[in-house]
Image: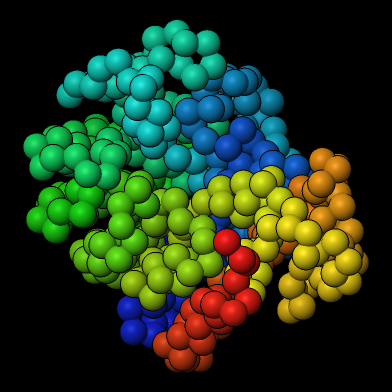
């Protein structure tokens, strides 16, 4: 059993993903450790913040330091000092999001220029499976074709067709011990293509399913509508993973639509720009109004930044480009999102998700306390 459902409330679900490195309560936010590190954050700190599963990146780890190096050093868990569950993406998102590096896509695979040295490289479903087997992640993703927002139907249809074929090829290839394999539905905002993609992949019977090709620049309301359909087209008994959402409002919206897992670089990337996620909206600590502000980043947060330091101090660190400033903001932003998702789970278990989410979205949207433009 890969996934057990503990409670549902409307479409929202609370469950448990069972992996070779432990159980993950869902909904689950997965901090992103692209290059085998969540930037500036120690694995012990990740654990203390409430992280239960991390993301690693097939594309980047393949090129640097290479899956052979990582395998020789005991696999990705040992290499990065994290003994909890890890999900690795397939590299599909990087290959197709770095579109100016694409050289050719055909039925067999995709050729592109590596972002590291410009050399022509080729990814196939077989290579994606091989890399992830050597990394030893708990959840491996199928290689997919992520079409950008706004492409024509023909291109979208081709992406769906190849994504299914590639999933079929990758499904039964060798995998690490206990490794789960998820397929990724495509189809953009096109209802028919999304339904076709989901149904073809569900017929192939994977351990779980991701909703891909959204959050790639399309309008938010349309994205959420597509999420509703995409989630509903997937089996109730399998985990559902929305790829690439991590803003507080977006997280709540996809949980409401039946999504169990999601990832985003937003908490750590936002931190590196000097901003904090809070119940007052996003605070840009560079703003002069925080120069003498004795309050923590967020009054309700129990993270290592909020329990010890003032906004004024963190603003000083950020302005002086002190590494501790971005570390504290990273710790806070991760904790804020992990706490938010834990609260969502509790509300689903209580059967109170609708009122909890309405209240949370209203708090996050309070216009009077938003950052001045
Ligand atoms: Zn905090």
Q: Is residue 47 above or below residue 306?
A: above
Q: Nearer the viewer, residue 321 or 47?
A: 321
Residue 100 vertical placement versus 144 (above, below): above
Res. 245 in view: yes
Residue 203 spot, x, y in % from top left: 17, 52
Q: Is residue 252 above or below residue 7?
A: above
Write the residue at 54% across / 16% down: 116
Q: Position of residue 362 (x, y in %)?
A: 50, 83
Residue at 14% across, 58% down: 191
Q: How is the image coloured?
A: rainbow
- 200 in relation to 116, above or below: below
Whether residue 331 appears in this view of the structure is no
Query: Residue 35's spot in the image, x, y percent?
Result: 61, 33
- Give the number of marks: 0
Q: Position of residue 64 (x, y in %)?
A: 59, 21
Left or right, residue 199 beside residue 352: left
Residue at x 76%, y 48% (from the top left corner): 326
Q: Is residue 281 left or right of residue 169?
A: right
Quadrant of the image containing the C terminus? bottom right
Image quadrant for the N terminus? bottom left
- The single residue placed furthest to the top in the displayed view is 119
Residue at position x 82%, y 55% from top?
315
Quarter of the image for residue 277 reads bottom right
Q: Nearer the viewer, residue 177 or 285?
A: 285
Tell me if 103 is positioned left or right of 22 in this view. left
């Amino acid at each position: 059993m890969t996934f057990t459902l503990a409670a549902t409330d409307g479409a929202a679900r609370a469950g448990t993903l069972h992996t070779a490195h432990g159980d993950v309560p869902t909904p689950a936010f997965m901090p992103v450790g692209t290059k085998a590190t969540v930037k500036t954050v120690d694995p012990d700190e990740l654990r203390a913040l409430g992280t239960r599963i991390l993301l690693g990146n097939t594309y980047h780890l393949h090129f640097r330091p290479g899956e052979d190096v990582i395998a020789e050093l005991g696999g990705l868990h040992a290499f990065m000092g994290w003994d909890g569950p890890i999900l690795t993406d397939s590299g599909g998102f990087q290959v197709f999001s770095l579109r100016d590096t694409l050289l050719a896509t055909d039925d067999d695979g995709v050729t592109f220029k590596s972002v590291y040295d410009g050399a022509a490289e080729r990814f196939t479903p077989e290579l994606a499976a091989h890399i992830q087997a050597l990394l030893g992640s708990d959840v491996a993703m199928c290689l997919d074709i992520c079409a950008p927002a706004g492409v024509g139907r023909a291109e979208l249809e081709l992406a769906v067709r190849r994504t299914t074929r590639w999933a079929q090829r990758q499904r039964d290839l060798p995998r690490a011990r206990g490794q789960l394999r998820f397929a990724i539905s495509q189809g953009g905002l096109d209802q028919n293509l999304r339904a076709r993609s989901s149904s073809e992949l569900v017929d192939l019977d994977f351990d779980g399913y991701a909703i891909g090709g959204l959050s790639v620049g399309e309008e938010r309301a349309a994205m959420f509508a597509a999420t509703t359909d995409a989630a509903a087209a997937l089996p109730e008994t399998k985990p559902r993973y929305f790829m690439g959402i991590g803003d507080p409002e977006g997280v709540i919206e996809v949980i409401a639509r039946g999504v169990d897992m999601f990832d985003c670089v937003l908490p750590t990337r936002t931190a590196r720009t000097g901003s904090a996620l809070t119940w007052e909206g996003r605070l840009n600590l560079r703003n002069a109004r925080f120069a003498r502000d004795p309050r923590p980043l967020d009054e309700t947060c129990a993270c290592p930044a909020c329990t010890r330091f003032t906004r004024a101090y963190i603003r000083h660190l950020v302005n002086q480009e002190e590494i501790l400033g971005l570390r504290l903001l990273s710790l806070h932003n991760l904790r804020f999102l992990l706490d938010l998702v834990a609260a969502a789970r509790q509300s689903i278990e209580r059967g109170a998700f609708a009122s909890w989410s309405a209240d949370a979205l209203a708090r996050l949207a309070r216009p009077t306390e938003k950052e001045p433009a």
